[in-house]
Amino acid sequence: MSKSRIEKRFADLKAEGRAAFVPYVMAGDPDAETALAILKGLPAAGADLIEVGFPFSDPMAEGPPIQRAAQRALSKGMTLKATLGAIAAFRAADADTPVILMGYMNPLVTWGVEAFARDAAAAGVDGLIIVDCPPEEADPLADALDAHDISLIRLATPTTDDARLQVVVRRTSGFVYYVSVAGVTGVKEADAAAVAPHVERVRKASGLPVAVGFGIKTPERAEAVARVADAVVVGSALVDEVAEAVELNEDVTGRVLSKVGALAKAVRLARRVPA
Protein backbone atom coordinates (compact mmCIF):
# COMPACT_ATOMS: atom_id res chain seq x y z
CA MET A 1 0.00 0.00 0.00
CA SER A 2 3.01 2.27 0.36
CA LYS A 3 3.12 4.28 -2.85
CA SER A 4 -0.66 4.30 -3.10
CA ARG A 5 -0.88 5.89 0.37
CA ILE A 6 1.14 8.89 -0.88
CA GLU A 7 -0.76 9.08 -4.15
CA LYS A 8 -4.13 8.88 -2.40
CA ARG A 9 -3.24 11.62 0.07
CA PHE A 10 -2.16 14.04 -2.66
CA ALA A 11 -5.23 13.19 -4.76
CA ASP A 12 -7.52 13.83 -1.80
CA LEU A 13 -5.84 17.16 -1.04
CA LYS A 14 -6.01 18.22 -4.69
CA ALA A 15 -9.74 17.53 -4.58
CA GLU A 16 -9.96 19.72 -1.48
CA GLY A 17 -8.03 22.45 -3.26
CA ARG A 18 -5.24 22.77 -0.74
CA ALA A 19 -1.60 21.96 -0.19
CA ALA A 20 -0.28 19.32 2.20
CA PHE A 21 1.50 20.16 5.42
CA VAL A 22 4.52 17.93 6.04
CA PRO A 23 6.32 18.20 9.38
CA TYR A 24 9.81 16.78 9.72
CA VAL A 25 10.82 15.24 13.04
CA MET A 26 14.02 13.51 14.08
CA ALA A 27 13.58 9.96 15.37
CA GLY A 28 14.71 9.69 18.98
CA ASP A 29 14.84 13.44 19.65
CA PRO A 30 15.06 14.30 22.50
CA ASP A 31 14.57 10.64 23.52
CA ALA A 32 12.77 7.63 22.07
CA GLU A 33 9.65 7.85 24.23
CA THR A 34 9.04 11.56 23.65
CA ALA A 35 9.81 11.33 19.95
CA LEU A 36 7.25 8.53 19.57
CA ALA A 37 4.64 10.58 21.41
CA ILE A 38 5.29 13.48 19.04
CA LEU A 39 5.09 11.19 16.01
CA LYS A 40 1.78 9.70 17.14
CA GLY A 41 0.34 13.17 17.76
CA LEU A 42 1.23 14.69 14.40
CA PRO A 43 -1.84 13.64 12.35
CA ALA A 44 -4.30 15.06 14.89
CA ALA A 45 -2.24 18.27 15.00
CA GLY A 46 -2.64 18.69 11.24
CA ALA A 47 0.09 16.69 9.49
CA ASP A 48 -0.96 15.38 6.07
CA LEU A 49 2.28 13.47 5.48
CA ILE A 50 5.17 13.02 7.90
CA GLU A 51 8.93 13.05 7.32
CA VAL A 52 10.97 11.17 9.88
CA GLY A 53 14.71 11.73 9.92
CA PHE A 54 16.96 8.95 11.10
CA PRO A 55 19.99 10.29 12.98
CA PHE A 56 23.36 10.14 11.28
CA SER A 57 26.70 11.39 12.53
CA ASP A 58 27.51 13.44 9.41
CA PRO A 59 24.27 15.04 8.13
CA MET A 60 25.84 17.11 5.36
CA ALA A 61 22.64 18.76 4.10
CA GLU A 62 21.51 19.92 7.51
CA GLY A 63 22.07 23.18 9.30
CA PRO A 64 22.81 23.48 13.03
CA PRO A 65 19.26 22.78 14.34
CA ILE A 66 18.91 19.36 12.71
CA GLN A 67 22.57 18.54 13.32
CA ARG A 68 21.94 19.11 17.01
CA ALA A 69 18.75 17.04 16.86
CA ALA A 70 20.69 14.15 15.35
CA GLN A 71 23.32 14.42 18.06
CA ARG A 72 20.66 14.43 20.80
CA ALA A 73 19.08 11.32 19.29
CA LEU A 74 22.39 9.51 18.83
CA SER A 75 23.41 10.33 22.39
CA LYS A 76 20.28 8.55 23.61
CA GLY A 77 21.06 5.47 21.52
CA MET A 78 18.67 5.97 18.61
CA THR A 79 19.46 3.75 15.62
CA LEU A 80 17.98 3.12 12.20
CA LYS A 81 16.51 -0.15 13.51
CA ALA A 82 14.86 1.70 16.37
CA THR A 83 13.58 4.31 13.91
CA LEU A 84 11.78 1.60 11.95
CA GLY A 85 10.44 0.30 15.25
CA ALA A 86 8.98 3.73 16.02
CA ILE A 87 7.35 3.91 12.59
CA ALA A 88 5.87 0.44 13.11
CA ALA A 89 4.44 1.59 16.46
CA PHE A 90 2.95 4.65 14.77
CA ARG A 91 1.55 2.57 11.92
CA ALA A 92 -0.21 0.21 14.34
CA ALA A 93 -2.59 3.06 15.18
CA ASP A 94 -2.58 4.98 11.88
CA ALA A 95 -3.06 3.17 8.60
CA ASP A 96 -3.53 6.25 6.44
CA THR A 97 -0.92 8.96 7.01
CA PRO A 98 2.04 8.57 4.63
CA VAL A 99 5.43 8.37 6.34
CA ILE A 100 8.59 9.40 4.51
CA LEU A 101 11.95 8.37 5.93
CA MET A 102 14.78 10.84 5.32
CA GLY A 103 18.49 10.38 5.86
CA TYR A 104 21.81 9.30 4.41
CA MET A 105 23.15 6.35 2.45
CA ASN A 106 25.81 4.93 4.74
CA PRO A 107 23.43 3.25 7.24
CA LEU A 108 21.47 1.70 4.35
CA VAL A 109 24.62 0.25 2.81
CA THR A 110 25.54 -1.21 6.19
CA TRP A 111 22.06 -2.72 6.50
CA GLY A 112 21.95 -3.89 2.87
CA VAL A 113 19.59 -2.05 0.55
CA GLU A 114 17.43 -5.08 -0.30
CA ALA A 115 17.03 -6.06 3.35
CA PHE A 116 16.41 -2.47 4.34
CA ALA A 117 13.68 -2.01 1.74
CA ARG A 118 11.97 -5.17 2.97
CA ASP A 119 12.17 -4.11 6.61
CA ALA A 120 11.12 -0.53 5.91
CA ALA A 121 8.04 -1.75 4.05
CA ALA A 122 7.18 -4.09 6.91
CA ALA A 123 7.42 -1.13 9.33
CA GLY A 124 5.03 0.94 7.21
CA VAL A 125 7.39 3.33 5.42
CA ASP A 126 5.89 4.84 2.25
CA GLY A 127 8.78 6.82 0.81
CA LEU A 128 12.49 7.37 1.20
CA ILE A 129 14.63 10.49 0.72
CA ILE A 130 18.37 9.82 0.69
CA VAL A 131 20.15 13.13 0.50
CA ASP A 132 23.59 11.88 -0.56
CA CYS A 133 22.61 9.27 -3.17
CA PRO A 134 23.10 10.75 -6.66
CA PRO A 135 20.75 9.54 -9.41
CA GLU A 136 23.64 7.97 -11.33
CA GLU A 137 24.29 5.58 -8.43
CA ALA A 138 20.73 5.02 -7.27
CA ASP A 139 19.47 2.17 -9.45
CA PRO A 140 20.19 -0.63 -6.93
CA LEU A 141 18.35 1.31 -4.22
CA ALA A 142 15.49 2.22 -6.58
CA ASP A 143 15.16 -1.44 -7.65
CA ALA A 144 15.01 -2.59 -4.02
CA LEU A 145 12.40 0.03 -3.12
CA ASP A 146 10.30 -0.70 -6.20
CA ALA A 147 10.17 -4.36 -5.19
CA HIS A 148 8.47 -3.30 -1.95
CA ASP A 149 6.34 -0.45 -3.34
CA ILE A 150 8.26 2.31 -1.58
CA SER A 151 8.72 5.63 -3.36
CA LEU A 152 12.20 6.99 -3.93
CA ILE A 153 11.78 10.73 -3.54
CA ARG A 154 14.45 13.02 -4.93
CA LEU A 155 15.57 16.55 -4.25
CA ALA A 156 15.65 19.33 -6.85
CA THR A 157 17.33 22.63 -6.03
CA PRO A 158 17.56 26.17 -7.39
CA THR A 159 20.71 25.12 -9.24
CA THR A 160 19.07 22.10 -10.96
CA ASP A 161 18.91 23.08 -14.63
CA ASP A 162 16.50 21.53 -17.13
CA ALA A 163 18.93 18.86 -18.33
CA ARG A 164 19.81 17.80 -14.79
CA LEU A 165 16.16 17.85 -13.79
CA GLN A 166 15.41 15.12 -16.31
CA VAL A 167 18.03 12.95 -14.62
CA VAL A 168 16.72 13.76 -11.15
CA VAL A 169 13.11 12.81 -11.90
CA ARG A 170 13.85 9.65 -13.88
CA ARG A 171 13.02 7.17 -11.10
CA THR A 172 11.30 9.51 -8.68
CA SER A 173 7.82 8.66 -7.46
CA GLY A 174 5.38 9.95 -4.87
CA PHE A 175 6.48 13.57 -5.09
CA VAL A 176 9.55 15.70 -5.75
CA TYR A 177 11.10 17.63 -2.87
CA TYR A 178 12.11 21.09 -4.05
CA VAL A 179 14.80 22.69 -1.88
CA SER A 180 13.76 26.33 -1.90
CA VAL A 181 17.11 27.86 -0.97
CA ALA A 182 20.72 27.08 -1.78
CA GLY A 183 22.61 25.74 1.21
CA VAL A 184 21.73 23.70 4.28
CA THR A 185 18.49 23.46 6.23
CA GLY A 186 17.37 26.09 8.70
CA VAL A 187 19.57 29.00 7.60
CA LYS A 188 17.88 31.06 4.85
CA GLU A 189 14.18 31.79 4.36
CA ALA A 190 12.08 30.69 1.40
CA ASP A 191 10.56 33.32 -0.89
CA ALA A 192 7.28 32.07 -2.36
CA ALA A 193 7.43 34.41 -5.36
CA ALA A 194 10.90 33.17 -6.27
CA VAL A 195 9.92 29.54 -5.67
CA ALA A 196 6.75 29.54 -7.79
CA PRO A 197 8.28 29.26 -11.30
CA HIS A 198 10.67 26.53 -10.14
CA VAL A 199 7.79 24.53 -8.65
CA GLU A 200 5.93 24.72 -11.94
CA ARG A 201 9.04 23.66 -13.86
CA VAL A 202 9.63 20.65 -11.58
CA ARG A 203 5.95 19.69 -11.67
CA LYS A 204 5.96 19.78 -15.49
CA ALA A 205 9.16 17.74 -15.77
CA SER A 206 8.11 15.08 -13.27
CA GLY A 207 4.34 14.89 -13.55
CA LEU A 208 4.35 14.66 -9.75
CA PRO A 209 3.34 16.86 -6.84
CA VAL A 210 6.08 19.18 -5.63
CA ALA A 211 6.81 19.68 -1.93
CA VAL A 212 8.82 22.74 -0.93
CA GLY A 213 11.10 22.68 2.07
CA PHE A 214 14.16 24.37 3.63
CA GLY A 215 13.68 27.93 4.87
CA ILE A 216 10.07 27.74 6.08
CA LYS A 217 9.78 28.58 9.77
CA THR A 218 6.64 30.64 10.36
CA PRO A 219 2.92 30.22 9.62
CA GLU A 220 3.10 33.30 7.39
CA ARG A 221 5.89 31.81 5.29
CA ALA A 222 4.15 28.42 5.19
CA GLU A 223 0.92 30.07 4.02
CA ALA A 224 2.69 31.89 1.20
CA VAL A 225 4.47 28.77 -0.04
CA ALA A 226 1.24 26.72 0.21
CA ARG A 227 -0.29 28.94 -2.45
CA VAL A 228 2.28 27.87 -5.04
CA ALA A 229 3.38 24.36 -3.98
CA ASP A 230 1.60 21.02 -3.53
CA ALA A 231 3.12 20.55 -0.08
CA VAL A 232 5.00 22.57 2.52
CA VAL A 233 7.73 20.91 4.59
CA VAL A 234 8.88 22.34 7.93
CA GLY A 235 11.72 20.78 9.90
CA SER A 236 14.23 23.08 11.57
CA ALA A 237 11.51 25.17 13.23
CA LEU A 238 10.12 22.03 14.86
CA VAL A 239 13.42 20.63 16.10
CA ASP A 240 14.13 24.10 17.50
CA GLU A 241 10.95 23.71 19.55
CA VAL A 242 12.29 20.43 20.91
CA ALA A 243 15.58 22.04 21.90
CA GLU A 244 13.96 25.04 23.55
CA ALA A 245 11.44 22.93 25.45
CA VAL A 246 14.22 20.71 26.78
CA GLU A 247 16.28 23.72 27.81
CA LEU A 248 13.32 25.30 29.62
CA ASN A 249 12.11 22.00 31.09
CA GLU A 250 8.77 22.40 29.32
CA ASP A 251 6.41 19.80 27.84
CA VAL A 252 8.27 18.88 24.65
CA THR A 253 5.42 17.00 23.00
CA GLY A 254 2.86 19.70 23.69
CA ARG A 255 5.11 22.48 22.49
CA VAL A 256 6.01 20.74 19.21
CA LEU A 257 2.42 19.75 18.44
CA SER A 258 1.23 23.29 19.16
CA LYS A 259 3.71 24.62 16.60
CA VAL A 260 2.61 21.96 14.12
CA GLY A 261 -1.00 23.01 14.63
CA ALA A 262 -0.28 26.64 13.87
CA LEU A 263 1.70 25.80 10.74
CA ALA A 264 -0.85 23.25 9.54
CA LYS A 265 -3.70 25.72 9.95
CA ALA A 266 -1.83 28.30 7.89
CA VAL A 267 -1.26 25.77 5.10
CA ARG A 268 -4.84 24.50 5.24
CA LEU A 269 -6.30 27.99 4.87
CA ALA A 270 -3.71 29.46 2.48
CA ARG A 271 -5.71 29.21 -0.72
CA ARG A 272 -8.86 30.58 0.91
CA VAL A 273 -7.11 33.82 1.81
CA PRO A 274 -6.40 36.46 -0.87
CA ALA A 275 -2.67 36.79 -1.53
Image: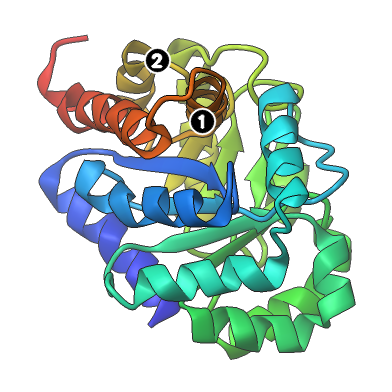
Badge 1: residue crowd in 10 Å (few <14, some 14–19, many ≥20): many
x%, y% of residue 221? 39, 14
Mark 1 → mark 2, Cα distance in angstroms:
16 Å
Q: Residue drawn 78% across and 55% down?
A: 104
Q: Residue drawn 81% across and 42% down?
A: 59
* Relative to 188, residue 117 above or below: below
Q: The residue tagged with tag 1: helix, strand or loop? A: helix
* Relative to 178, residue 165 above or below: below
Q: Residue drawn 61% across and 63% down?
A: 128
Q: Residue drawn 74% across and 25% down?
A: 63
Q: Earlier in the sequence, mark 1 or mark 2?
A: 2
Is residue 55 left or right of 271 when viewed as pictured?
right
x%, y% of residue 261? 25, 32
Nearer-the-camera pick, 134 or 183: 183
Residue 242 is tagged as 1
**Label 2 sits on what residue type?**
Thr
Q: Within the image, what quadrant is residue 2 found in?
A: bottom left
Q: The residue tagged with tag 2: helix, strand or loop? A: loop
Quarter of the image with the C terminus in it: top left
The single residue placed furthest to the front in the displayed view is 249
Is residue 200 left or right of 82 when viewed as pictured?
left
* Relative to 23, residue 141 above or below: below
Badge 2: residue crowd in 10 Å (few <14, some 14–19, many ≥20): some
Nearer-the-camera pick, 119 or 38: 38
Is residue 262 left or right of 15 when viewed as pictured?
right
Residue 149 appears in the picture as rendered: no
x%, y% of residue 190? 53, 16
* Relative to 128, residue 204 above or below: above
**Label 1 sits on what residue type?**
Val
Residue 218 is tagged as 2
